[in-house]
Image (tube, rainbow, N blue to C red):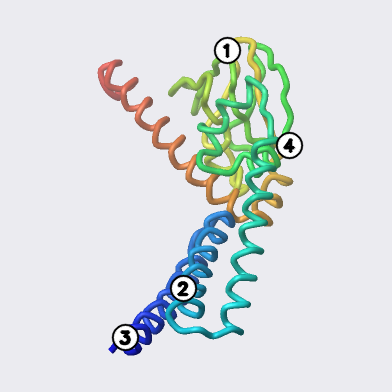
């Protein structure tokens, strides 16, 4: 009876291991994949070492566990060593929410910081968007057809709607004050995101959230002005 119970547990753990291994392949982020593989290896160790002794399977499951634990430890150490400036920290939530700090650091290094002057145009309606901008300080006016339709300021993105598609801008964005900006060239940004799918996923989610926020603010402005005339 005890042997039947052990065999049943070994069978269950063996199937659980492969279920966990399959599930580990689903997340977009590598660290989650490694955590899933660790869980799968632990299930395999229980199946081949505790409930039904199989030396060969036990060896390979222990090896799988150790390798992924070492890689996870290296990941944690590299993340702990990453540093961001006071300007960059807010970007982590505005643009790179949920992305490991080491990956976020690598993405931010694709762009540069600059200071803009009042009156400078960041993107122009009907023209290709050449850069993605993040406004850390300052504000800008959004206009379409020569009429002001909204404003953007600290914490907002500029150019996110079309920077990845290569389409022309649907509005003009002009700085209304001195501003501190992070910007990245559109062409190199597209190539970078094509090669780093986990970063692309995080960025696209942020782009969608930024667009929703802008539409909400625009609707509020229209309502406060008494509607469209």
The mark closer to the camera, 1 or 2, is 2
| Quadrant for the N terminus in the image | bottom left
Query: Residue 107, percent across and down?
Result: 67, 41
Q: Which residue is mark 3?
A: 2
Q: What is the spatial separation of the Cα atoms under label 1 and label 2, in whole angstroms?
A: 64 Å
Disc 2 crowd rating (10 Å Cα; few below 14, some 14-19, many 20+) is: some
The mark closer to the camera, 4 or 3, is 3
Q: Nearer the viewer, residue 83 or 59?
A: 59
Which residue is depicted at the point 62% across and 61% down? 68
Q: Left or right: where does residue 26 sit relative to residue 134?
A: left
Q: Specify which label sits upstream in the sequence, 4 or 3.
A: 3
Q: Specify which label sits upstream in the sequence, 1 or 2.
A: 2
Disc 1 crowd rating (10 Å Cα; few below 14, some 14-19, many 20+) is: some
Q: Which residue is mark 1?
A: 176
The mark closer to the camera, 3 or 1, is 3
Q: Specify which label sits upstream in the sequence, 3 or 1.
A: 3
Q: Specify which label sits upstream in the sequence, 4 or 2.
A: 2
User: What kind of element bears circle 3?
Assistant: helix
User: What kind of element bears circle 4?
Assistant: loop
Compared to residue 26, the image places residue 217 above or below, namely above
Contact (Cβ within 8 Å) of mark 4 with mark 2: no
Q: Specify which label sits upstream in the sequence, 1 or 4.
A: 4
Name the disc covering residue 109, or none: 4
């Amino acid at each position: 009876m005890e042997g039947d119970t052990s065999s049943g547990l070994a069978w269950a753990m063996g199937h659980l291991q492969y279920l966990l291994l399959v599930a580990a392949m689903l997340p977009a982020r590598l660290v989650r994949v490694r955590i899933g593989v660790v869980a799968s290896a632990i299930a395999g160790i229980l199946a081949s070492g505790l409930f039904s002794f199989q030396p060969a399977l036990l060896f390979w499951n222990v090896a799988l566990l150790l390798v992924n634990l070492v890689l996870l430890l290296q990941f944690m150490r590299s993340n702990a060593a990453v540093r961001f400036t006071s300007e960059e920290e807010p970007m982590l939530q505005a643009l790179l929410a949920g992305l490991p700090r080491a990956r976020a650091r690598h993405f931010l290094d694709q762009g540069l910081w600059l200071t803009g002057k009042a009156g400078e145009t960041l993107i122009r309606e009907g023209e290709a968007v050449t850069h993605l901008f993040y406004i850390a300080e300052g504000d800008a006016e959004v206009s379409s057809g020569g009429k002001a339709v909204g404003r953007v300021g600290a914490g907002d993105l500029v150019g996110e709607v079309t920077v990845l598609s290569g389409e022309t801008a649907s509005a003009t964005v002009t700085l209304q004050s001195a501003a501190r900006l992070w910007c990245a060239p559109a062409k190199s940004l597209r190539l970078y995101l094509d090669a780093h799918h986990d970063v692309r996923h995080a960025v696209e989610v942020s782009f969608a959230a930024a667009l929703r926020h802008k539409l909400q603010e625009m609707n509020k402005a229209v309502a406060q002005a008494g509607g469209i005339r």
